[in-house]
Amino acid sequence: MPAALLLEEPTAKRRAERGDEDASASASARDCKRLKAGDANMVKWEPERWEQAEAENDDDDVPLARYQRRRPRPPSKAKEQAKKRMRKPQEQETTFELSAKRRVLVRKWKNVVLVDIREFYDEDGVAKPSKKGLSLSLEQWHKLVELSDAVSEAIQLVEENRIRKDSLVDVPGRIPKPGGDSRAIAFPLSAKRRMTVRFFHALVLIDLREFYEQDGAAKPGKKGIALSKDQWVSLQEVAEDISDAAERL
């Protein structure tokens, strides 16, 4: 083959390659011009839009997901279980108000009638029971009612700071000066529950509380509620109605 042809063929090939490069560069330049001119077919860089798209993107590996509407997810199992655990008000429940935030709830739980003396809190205009309180069995409630007169006398003794070892000696099981508290007297409601009349910060309180044993001594637990004198009086005023409501369950 003549040498001229051998030289001409690579030269033509190089020219063709340069032509492709020039065409590609021209296309890129045209694209840049269209982008600057605001071509409607091109996606402009808008920080707010991209931040929103990134927030809505469920799959980083699928760019188109940024522009797709988010599909509603089915409720998680945890949320469903939380809804099931929410206590629904029962038709058989009866409520008695002792004050703005203290109530007595007569209810049935697992076929057991309870007299629940509890503090409530407000949530979106709805009164909800808090952890501060004590649920009494019927036997414990009846014991509380039996001790009403003794508690009223104990309130006066505590106010006047006249608690002695022989105070209310005729009341079975009474515990004067429990735990070394010289201005208190306790009455058992059950083996682990007590009603204690005590003096605290210039106030007389009627404390309904569950106790636990530690090193052979009874210690007050967190489960319980302390009533003021006014709340105790309110409880006595509705005690008969509470008993009637409990008997109907």
Image (cartoon, grey):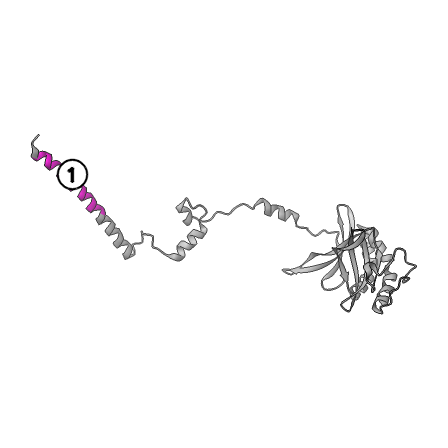
Say above or below: 248 vs 120. above
Query: Does 201 sit left or right of 76 as displayed?
Result: right
Q: Seen from this angle, which residue lies furthest front?
A: 215
Nearer to me, 175 or 84:
175
Q: Seen from this angle, which residue lies furthest right?
A: 170
Quadrant of the image containing the N terminus: top left
Check disc 1 and give the amino acid type. Lys
| Residue 81 x %, y % | 62, 46
Nearer to me, 1 or 235:
1
What is the quadrant of residue 147 in the picture? bottom right
Q: Which residue is mark 1?
A: 13
Query: Does 106 sit left or right of 154 as displayed?
Result: left
| Residue 89 x %, y % | 70, 52
| Residue 57 x %, y % | 44, 49
In magenta segment, residue 238: no
Look at the image and give the residue range highlighted in magenta: 4-24
Say above or below: 201 vs 27. below
| Residue 227 x %, y % | 77, 62
10 Å crowding of disc 1: few (<14), some (14-19), many (20+):
few
